Image (cartoon, rainbow, N blue to C red):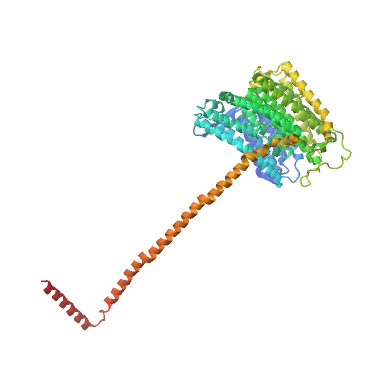
Amino acid sequence: MSALLWALIALPLGAGAALLLSGRRWNALAPGLGLAAAAGTFGLAVASAVFRPEASAPLFAGVRAGLRVDGLSAVLVVAVAAVTTAVLVASPGELGPRENRGRFFGLMLLFAGAMTVTVTATTLPPLLMAWEVMGATSWALIGFWWHRPDRVRAADTAFVTTRAADLGLYLAAGAAMAGGVGSLDLTALTGAQGGWRHVACAGLVVAALGKSAQLPFSFWLSHAMRGPGPVSALLHSATMVAAGAYLLLRLHPLLVATGWAAPLVAWTGGVTALALGVVAVAQRALKQLLAASTSSQVGFMVLAAGVGDPSGGTLQLLAHAAAKSALFLAAGAWLTSLGTEQLPALRGAVRRHPLLGAGFVAGALALAGLPPLSLWVAKDEVLAAARAQSPGLYALGLAAAAVAAGYSVKALWYVTRPLPHDHDHDHGQEQDGGRRGARGPTRSVSTPVVVLAAAAVFLGVAALPGLSGPLRGVLGGGQQHAPNPWEMALSAAVALAAAGAAWWWLPRSAHAPRTASAGKRWAADWLSMERAARAVLVRPAFALARALAAFDDRAVDGAVHHLARGGLTLARGAARADDHGLDGAVRAVAAGCRRLGAWARRPQTGLLHQYYAQAVVGFTLLLSIVLLVR
């Protein structure tokens, strides 16, 4: 059965790479080829969920790359493939005829393939490699319209923020190796010796929180909204932001083994759910509202991971994926057709596009957590597990559920208002070089929105008391966290009361003066998290870099320059000594030799009688010396 798993991974990765390399050459065929690959992947995902294949391959000495489809990953691979297929059905309506469709569909398939590897990986090496591919492809997709500098800057911000958190995976891998976990199997991380287990867990937690846009990393998701609508629908529903939550759900035994990680993760998820819900309420742009609500909703998944509720966290992931992908697709379609995403300018959007509007309304009602829709049931699962751990966590989650109803109703209220009198004119245009505002939503966009919204509405049935046995059996959640009837009634009452209060308050706030309080501006600015990151990390890092550069220029380079100048001075002195000393002596010896030679040449006249005379003189001198010596 390993061939089935290899095919599940190879199809989206191979088709994505081929489309990416083809570029514009297959522009007309790219949507059909991409959709066919996604549909094939969905079929393989369903088969994998049924047969549960596993595979492994040698990677390094003593280290293998392991992949397996088990209960948790079986649900996720089907969800990823289904959402990818639905999003690719809607994608051609978002792209103009001159866009590079091969690059777009190729990147989307590569991203989906990397997410599939992430959820099926059983060892750290393939998880880390897929994690990296997700980061790279998300950067390319967010900055898909690269000719706009603001899009590129947004992609850079999202990439750098998540990339900084991703370094935790490398820390975890190194700590696991140092702690004696030679196989790097995820289930073996709890066996790391000494303090290395804590280091590995800390690295994994940081990487997961960063990828899932949890506090304090949430602000990158605001920049990610600069990408095309289908990108937001895929990356920020069932894939990228869900990857961190999935990893924490998978590694709950490790969180518990450390003692400190599980409570930290649970409280981080709860605080993020509430705080980013408040941020969503303060937004005036639809995609920004949906982005903040994504961090908030993923907070419930992280909370579930912290309190040990895999079934509740997985149900929350599935319901949120269906609802949020539908909402993002609708928001992208309205941005394309109306040229704006500002909520006041979207009045009457539901009435202009009834089918698309119906899907948006259903998705928003599900996102609000209203009974009996899916996210109401999912939140009750998570809240029940939180109450078993801490009443404070339960109260925090209940407050976040109330805020969720508020921001969902805010989006609904604006898009369902009657059409403005000047609805034939553009409102708050945000056009992209004249491309936007030129087309209306097509059926290829409306149909997947309706299908996804229907899934968001009815998924909750699978987790209702009395019907949740099969789901819990698949996920291994047991019955210990099933919500009590009073808990479900309380959460329903809270959601309905919050929704009613928001519906009553919105007409009054819409006509109030535009001056916002400092608190509202702070919330609308995503709690100034990016400013804080720049103040705490970016600016000190640049200041340190400038100081090190100055130290390098003045100290290190200065020492090198001084050493070089000293070497040149020494060389010049040695050159002078060589020229005037050694070379002078050599020249003097040569001159003496030349003079001796000149003297020696003088007797050489060529006259025989002179040679005889010289010989007589020489013998006479020798004879005299002999006689004198004796």
Q: Nearer the viewer, residue 5 or 144?
A: 144
Q: Is residue 80 visible?
A: yes
The percent coordinates of residue 620 (x first, y second) are 15, 78
Q: Quadrant of residue 255?
A: top right
**Residue 176 in the image: above or below residue 573:** above
Between 382 and 581, the one lying in front of the other is: 581
| Left or right of 230, for residue 555 | left
Let me know if residue 52 appears in the view. no
* Left or right of residue 9: residue 278: right
**Residue 295, image x, y percentages:** 69, 32
Q: Quadrant of residue 450?
A: top right
Asked if residue 95 is positioned above or below residue 473 in the image, the reply reads below
Instruction: Residue at 60% x, 44% y: name it.
Output: 542
> Which residue is the extreme one toward the front?
518
Residue 587 in the image: state x and y as whole percent: 35, 69
Horizontal side of 135 relative to 498 (left or right) equals left
